[in-house]
Image (cartoon, rainbow, N blue to C red):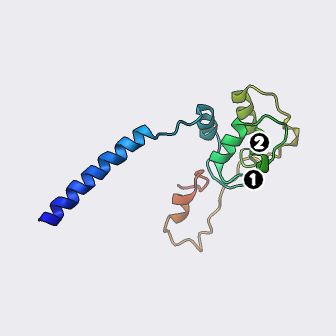
């Protein structure tokens, strides 16, 4: 009983300390980055040259030069290939900038096809698909 009681007290004290530390050491994020992240596809595919959509949103928010270069930490609104022209125009409208959409390749919406003869019905593909591209999900 002493071990259970002491571990309960220890857990409660550490939980309170973590709660206080969370409030005191909270890092404020840029609201523009959060808005851009909400607009991006969220698939974290890396086709833009960044580690994920959060890094791409930060790079788009800090873009000051006309180059789309991941090494400089800056990106244009047109750097997301899966988003296509629709995403680029949405980002440009949100940022209040004019962009040239002539260089953006837009293949249109894509649909994932699951080979029914190979499907075992485990639904793992549906759970990990971040864009609901699998019909029947």
In the image, is 121 to the left or to the right of 101? Answer: left
Q: Position of residue 34 (x, y in %)?
A: 59, 37
Q: Quadrant of residue 102?
A: top right
Determine the residue positioned at 67% across, 55% down.
Answer: 45
User: Circle 1 sits in a helix, a strand or a loop, which is it?
Assistant: loop
Q: Quadrant of residue 74?
A: top right
Residue labelled with disc 2? 75
Give the total number of marks visible in the rendering. Answer: 2
Within 10 Å of disc 2 (Cα), the crowding (few <14, some 14-19, many 20+) is: many
Determine the residue positioned at 52% across, 72% down.
Answer: 120
The residues tagged by marks 1 and 2 sit, at their Cα atoms, a distance apart of: 9 Å
Does residue 69 appear in the picture of this structure?
yes
Q: In the rendered image of this protein, does residue 120 appear above or below residue 135?
A: below
In the image, is 137 to the left or to the right of 69? Answer: left
User: Circle 2 sits in a helix, a strand or a loop, which is it?
Assistant: loop
Q: Position of residue 44 (x, y in %)?
A: 64, 53
Which residue is at the far top?
96
Q: Position of residue 3 (x, y in %)?
A: 17, 65
Q: In the rendered image of this protein, does residue 47 appear above or below residue 73?
A: below
Image quarter of the N terminus: bottom left
Residue labelled with disc 1? 49
Q: Position of residue 87 (x, y in %)?
A: 71, 39
Whether pointer 1 and pointer 2 mark residues with C-beta atoms closer than 8 Å, the reply is: yes
* Sequence-wise first label, 1 or 2: 1
Q: Quadrant of residue 135?
A: bottom right
Q: In the rendered image of this protein, does residue 117 appear above or below residue 102?
A: below
In the image, is 132 to the left or to the right of 21? Answer: right
| Foreground pick, 112 / 39 | 39
Does residue 107 appear in the picture of this structure?
no
Within 10 Å of disc 1 (Cα), the crowding (few <14, some 14-19, many 20+) is: some
């Amino acid at each position: 009983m002493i071990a259970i009681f002491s571990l309960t007290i220890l857990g409660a004290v550490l939980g309170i300390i973590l709660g206080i530390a969370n409030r005191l050491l909270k890092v404020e994020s840029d609201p523009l980055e959060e808005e851009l992240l909400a607009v991006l596809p969220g698939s974290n595919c890396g086709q833009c040259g960044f580690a994920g959509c959060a890094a791409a949103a930060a790079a788009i928010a800090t873009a000051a030069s006309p180059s789309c270069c991941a090494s400089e930490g800056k990106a244009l609104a047109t750097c997301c290939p899966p988003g296509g022209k629709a995403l680029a125009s949405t980002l440009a409208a949100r940022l209040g900038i004019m962009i040239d959409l002539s260089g953006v390749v837009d293949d249109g919406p894509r649909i994932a096809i699951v080979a029914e003869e190979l499907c075992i019905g485990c639904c793992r593909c549906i759970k990990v698909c971040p864009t609901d591209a699998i019909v029947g999900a």
